[in-house]
Amino acid sequence: MTGLWWARRDLRLADNPALTGAQEDGGAAAVFAWTDGITRWSGRRSAHLARVLWQLRDQAGGALAVRRGAADAVVAQAAREAGAAVVWAAREFTPAGITEQDAAAAALEADGRELRLIGSPYAVAPGRVRKADGDPYKVFTPFRDAWRQHGWRSPADAGDPASLRPLAPHQDDIDLDQRAAHGDASDPLVEPHEFREDRLLADLDAFIADDLRRYRDDRDRPDLDGTSHLSTALAFGQIHPRTVLAATARERHPSARVFESELAWREFHADVLFHHPGARRESLTPVLRERDWLDGRDADEAFTAWRDGLTGFPLVDAGMRQLAQTGWMHNRVRMVVASLLVKDLRVPWQRGADHFRRALVDYDHAQNQLNWQWVAGTGRDASPFFRIFNPMTQADKFDPARRYVERWVPEVDTPAYPAPIVDHATERRITLDLYQAAKAERSS
Ligand SMILES: Cc1cc2nc3c(=O)[nH]c(=O)nc-3n(C[C@H](O)[C@H](O)[C@H](O)COP(=O)(O)OP(=O)(O)OC[C@H]3O[C@@H](n4cnc5c(N)ncnc54)[C@H](O)[C@@H]3O)c2cc1C
């Protein structure tokens, strides 16, 4: 009997229980649904997805169907064509992912088939790590400690690309060659190695061998670029966090524990969103009153200056331009730009999160929404609202020689560069006063 692997956010052959599950009984087919949701992604992100799928299909000897349509319809149709009684997929935990897999399970069941969910994009599935009384953790550090204690499986055996069977061409097939080349002037298909799974695994090994030791000291320095850049591979599931954790576990240097702790944040945010699906839009903790936020034209102008990297705060502008030009931004700078938008310009975090959704290639729903809530002081175990980053002292501390700023804002010291659009000290005071007033109103 043939199985079907429904590829989702697990676009890899290595360490993939859904793929190996589908191959349990021998040959299996593989399908990816190019849904309406994906058609709304930015051109850059969907081009990246196309490249990732392109390399996966290439590794699989062409045996990966990528079809336009709702996941339930695409998967049910592919299962019929493959004659698969069982469809294997990684379990999703985001609200949209759950809706999608419920619909696919129902469509398959109506056809006398079964959806079997196995594994997840996390070392420990969201909802699994709980306090002794069964409640979810609200605070990160005890979550992380319990998460470590819970532990995770060793990486699964690699899937066998040779036993994947292609599906016949279909009218809904996506033209991956064309999609993958779209949106990037330098044709990536000439040398698509940086999208290849084996190359990413080699990059991980190189990071661990060469840079992990420096991670604890350098990870906050955008000028030194001392982080792993694994976020995009993790977002598309080209590498499973369990594979990363198995590699870092062999390292004795304390930096390895700091790095694992960052991966624990990824798991914590996914856990929070799983327990509080509303957190994708709603603040978990109120901070200001509705009327305290900027709106109308003032908000539009402030937002536009922020988005375009023209606030007059060099570190913020450098970050926003790095994002616009590369689709990625250093974590410390993400925090500083988000703080400026929410706490100096008083634009609600959701608007910034929406912009990041359009601009980031490593966009991950849980990580983005919950990190915005963390900076905005509205999340679980968030940075307190009254902690307002000073964009000038952050720059002095984390980009001391101004190398990062000069790289992204070359005109910083010329008259062409704008003066700050607000006075940080003044806005900070206003925001804190509003916060106190909102707090008093809530408790009265
Ligand atoms: C406002 C804001 C929005 C963000 N949006 C996203 C997003 O959409 N997608 C995303 O993957 N990350 C997001 N992050 C988290 C973080 O900035 C990126 O994961 C990190 O910069 C990626 O670079 P790296 O892989 O080199 O990180 P490294 O420092 O090398 O960290 C290794 C891995 O740990 C995880 N990690 C590190 N920091 C965090 C964190 N704060 N929260 C959760 N996981 C973390 C990531 O998976 C990362 O790849 C956001 C942070 C902020 C402040």
Image (cartoon, grey):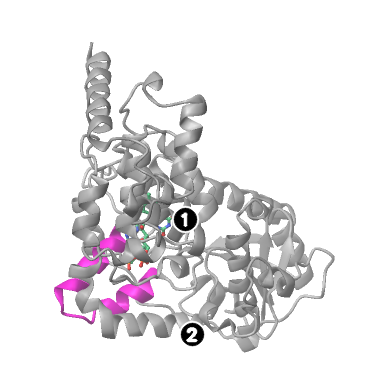
What residue do we see at 50% from left, 62% from top? 325
Residue 187: x and y, percent? Answer: 65, 77
Disc 1 secondary structure class: loop
Residue 339: x and y, percent? Answer: 32, 43
What residue do we see at 30% from left, 28% from top? 287
Q: Residue furthest bottom?
A: 162
Residue type at the position of mark 1:
Asp
Residue 113: x and y, percent? Answer: 69, 60
Rendering quadrant holding ligand 1? bottom left
| Residue 6 visible in image | no
Magenta stretch, residue numbers: 241-265
- Which residue is more in the foreground, 320 or 42? 320
Asked if 210 appears above or below 105 in the picture, the reply is below
* Residue that mark 2 sits on: 198
Q: Is residue 345 magenta?
A: no
Mark 1–mark 2 Cα distance, whole angstroms, equals 22 Å
User: Mark 2, residues whose alpha carbon is within 10 Å: few (<14), some, or many (≥20)?
Assistant: some
Q: Residue furthest right?
A: 171
User: Mark 1, residues whose alpha carbon is within 10 Å: few (<14), some, or many (≥20)?
Assistant: some
| Residue 206 visible in image | yes
Does label 1 point to a residue whose CB lies under 8 Å from ligand 1? yes
* Residue that mark 1 sits on: 364
